[in-house]
Image (cartoon, helix red, strand yellow):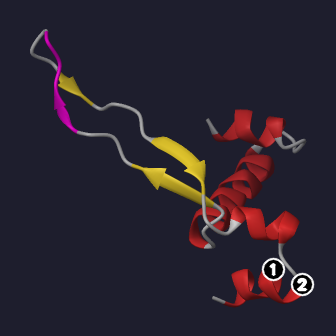
Amino acid sequence: QLPAAAEHLGLSADDDGAAYASEAWRLAVDTGLLDVTDPEEGELPDGGESEGEGTVTAGENLELLTTGSPQDVLGIWLE
């Protein structure tokens, strides 16, 4: 998934692009720009195990990047 994410971000789909996409993902999650909800583990109707898919939503701090003051934005990075 990282090469596709890198391409979506306009980065090369090679190892460097994937590494940059991974770093961007971690930064967005760590700073509260994105909230990740892990999937529920459970059993499928056919008896198999479900790995499921998690969900990602906008985090509390995402809106501050476009509507907050410079101090608000700086506060995101300093937390």
* Left or right, 16 with reference to 33: right
Image quarter where the N terminus lies is: top right
Tell me whether the residue at label 1 lies in contact with that at label 2, contact meaning CB atoms closer than 8 angstroms: yes
The residue that appears at 14% across and 12% down in the rendered structure is 45
Stretch in magenta: 41-45
In the picture as drawn, the residue positioned furthest to the top comes out as 46
- How crowded is the residue under tag 1: few (<14 C-alpha within 10 Å), some, or many (20+)? some
Q: Secondary structure at mark 2?
A: helix
Percent coordinates x, y for residue 10 in the rendering = 90, 41
- Which residue shows up at 82% across the image and 68% down it? 65
Please determine whether, in this image, residue 34 is positioned above or below residue 30.
above
CA distance separating discs 1 and 2? 5 Å
The amino acid sitting under disc 2 is: Pro
> What kind of secondary structure does the magenta stretch mostly adopt?
loop
Q: In the drawing, does residue 48 fall left or right of residue 8?
A: left
Name the residue beneath numbered marker 1. 73
Question: Could you tell me residue 48's position as x and y percent?
Answer: 15, 18
User: In the figure, 25 relative to 7: above or below?
Assistant: below
Magenta-drawn stretch contains 55: no
Residue type, mark 1 in image? Val
